[in-house]
Image (cartoon, grey):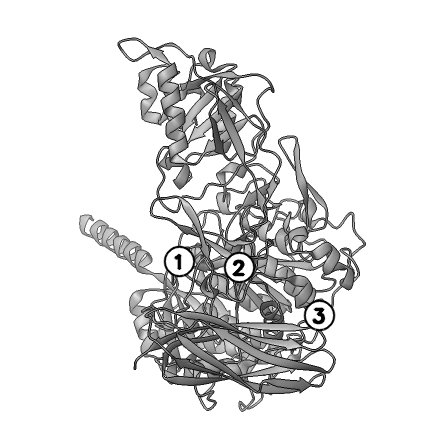
Amino acid sequence: MGFSVVVVVVLLLLSILNVVKAEIYIVTVEGEPVISYKGGIDGFEATAVEESDEKIDTTSELVTSYSRHLEKKHDMLLALLFDRGTYKKIYSYRHLINGFAAHISHEQAEILRRAPGVKSVERDWKVRRLTTHTPQFLGLPTGVWPTGGGFDRAGEDIVIGFIDSGIYPHHPSFSSHNSEPYGPLPKYRGKCEVDPNTKKKYCNGKIIGAQHFVEAAKAAGSFNPELDFDSILDGDGHGSHTAAIAAGNNGIPVRMHGFEFGRASGMAPRARIAVYKALYRLFGGFVSDVVAAIEQAVHDGVDILNLSVGPNSPPATTKTTFLNPFDATLLSAVKAGVFVAQAAGNGGPFPKTLLSYSPWIASVAAAVDDRRYKNHLTLGNGKILSGIGLSPSTHPNRTFTMVAANDVLLDSSVTKYSPADCQKPEALNKNLVEGNILLCGYSFNFVVGTASIKKVAETAKALGAAGFVLAVENASPGTKFDPVPVRLPGILITDVSMSMELVNYYNITTSRDWTGRVKSFKSMGSIGNGLRPILQKSAPQVAIFSARGPNIKDYSFQDADLLKPDILAPGSLIWAAWAPNGTDEANYCGEGFAMISGTSMAAPHIAGIAALIKQHHPHWSPAAIKSALMTTSSTIDRAERPLQAQQYSGSETLKLVRATPFDYGSGHVNPRAALDPGLIFDAGYQDYLGFLCTTPGIDAHEIKNFTHSPCNYTIGHPSNFNSPSIAVSHLVGTQTVTRTVTNVAEEETYVVTARMAPEIAIETNPPAMTLRRGASRKFTVTLTVRSVSGAYSFGEVLLKGSRGHKVRIPVVAMGYDR
């Protein structure tokens, strides 16, 4: 009896160990996916898409039967190798890549790796989120929307897919009540999930598709349905925010705490929204769920794809940045005619922090636009301390007594709760706080998110305070202070020296007994009005957090011959829709709107503007749209000075330095000019293959694994890829780079000029060229090392047209002796 119990216990332990050891792996297998299958298998005709503006016809019998054939092969392979019940297939990928995701043990992964017909086996890894006024700042209402028929037509019939944390469908930014009804859109074939509680569909015409992808997260044991919602509902806020930036309705009042902060609008307010939820509030997401979402979005027929998401860490099995499963899947999406905007990453201002690498993706950096919310605290001694705070002022013509949280504790035992944070009203003495200004300390808890400014305001209100001051007494480099809307007067003093002035004034004016207890509070102060933004001419600037180049070609951080980021768009302090149960930002819990920052906010600006270009030019390839955005962008600010980038000085304070293409790519987006770029630098699937095949260090076998194409097309050097930018990471002697432009306007003569920093000489040929509408011409750019500086040199090529078009491309190069 005892022996059999021991056996059962041992077996149970073994089964538990086996479950613990199992992980999710993404497996790719031989055989073409739908998008590149050219025929050759009996009974299955070709399904390949040849041109970049061609969509897969997923309804055709050819596609569905070949797709079923691939899925059967995946199932057969697993059934052949493993016993039923020892593995779980999570997804079959058939359209953009041929493979599957499965929950298997490490040993099973090794068996698969050695199995014939298996090309790669990669352990799944996590991804993370890269977290109103901007339409006017970008000139959309007067410059672009009228050409699309006004805001009520801007983005009409264009579908933007969002791979994100879902959506709050009941938000006015996504409502279809107050607009002309949305008709059916036959080109889009996405499903619409049903609310499990109300049994109603989440779609309303404006939201045209709604699906969620969570199988990998569930298999990994990371998913909590109570917190993460097993539906498309946004439990985070991030997904609602990005969707509203790109395609939210026009003119939605942004109201909070009884104040109105203007009206919010998406870049393309009439565009349709297709939701593909693959990110969740607590853990981010898994690549296999994200890849399944991308596959589905392309299958469904989206025009634009927005990805405000990036990998947490490099993949295990590929050294090449361009061939991680994320980018490889997006290459097939672009082949299917989908424009992809991706957040560049939030690792700035340090070099080589980009999370978006490939030439087929538009990698978007974040700018600070022209709004600043500033406030001030006036002390009883007449000193004025500046800070930030989106709040009303204390009563005009009055000063108030100031009391520090540490001096109004109910008893000393509460010190274990960090009472200076002012997160717990029950720890403080209401009789001493009421009618006074409460002084609190900004601790590390605010940085990690366990304390919030919203909670400080709630504490102050609960205690009847006239207002609050939150003083930063020490700050680590990289701490980002954003103004937070609050109902009662409040200010955050971010400058450490000013916080020390406040502390000194308070200590001098506050008398204490021999135990240190306060005998009388004599420090006085008043808080100014921080509700009105100050518009600055030095905008845009590259935001401190925005990831910087140079781009890298592998995870050993070797420089790539491709400039990234591609373009700069507003990404700091952006007002947009929020999910009331969103937890991504503690300061906006329970609110309908949030003002947040990140390259996550910049990418949907580009996705929305790309939708406007696609509406205007429906047959343009993704590369043509990206080219139009890049060549028309601006490298000067509103004060007509070169763009500046936020950077750290020696301490934690910010300084502004002259920005370079590694900060902003080609420049800050100019939507009006992008609709009529004059010339475009077009590229298709073969060009992307050429770039991969000529990049040194990439194994041709690895390229074939991911692209199903042999390397029989060369462009000589990766710098010859027809990008609207030029990057040469290792220039020795002289190198000539070729570019091809296509005229998308009336016949025009272009004069070609170039300038470069003195370390490198630059020449262009021919000096001028005339192009008829639709014609293409080649030109060359020759770079020669004059002196070796050990740093990159920057310049540009300018093509100036006789009809007024200006086409500008940035040039970056580093010279070497050999």
Residue to which mark 1 is pinned = 312
Q: Secondary structure at mark 3?
A: loop
What's the amino acid at mark 3? Lys
Residue to which mark 3 is pinned = 187
What's the amino acid at mark 2? Pro
* Percent x, y of residue 534: 60, 40
* Percent x, y of residue 158: 70, 64
Please tell me whether residue 19 is drawn above or below residue 419 in the rendered image. below
Please tell me whether residue 197 is drawn above or below residue 128 in the rendered image. above
Q: Judge by depth and name the residue closer to the eye, 760 or 652.
A: 760
Whole-number angstrom distance, CA of label 3 to CA of label 1: 35 Å
Q: Judge by depth and name the residue closer to the eye, 255 or 669.
A: 669
Residue to which mark 2 is pinned = 642
Q: Residue sitting at 30 percent across and 8 percent down?
A: 513
| Residue 553, quarter of the rendered image | bottom left
Whole-number angstrom distance, CA of label 2 to CA of label 1: 33 Å
Whole-number angstrom distance, CA of label 3 to CA of label 2: 43 Å
Question: Which of marks 2 and 3 precedes in the sequence?
Answer: 3
Question: Which of marks 1 and 3 precedes in the sequence?
Answer: 3
Pair 3/2: label in front: 2
Q: Judge by depth and name the residue closer to the eye, 247 or 123.
A: 247
| Residue 474, quarter of the rendered image | top left
Q: Are marks 3 and 1 in contact (CB under 8 Å)?
A: no
On the question of residue 161 being in view, the answer is no
Q: Residue sitting at 46 percent across and 11 percent down?
A: 431
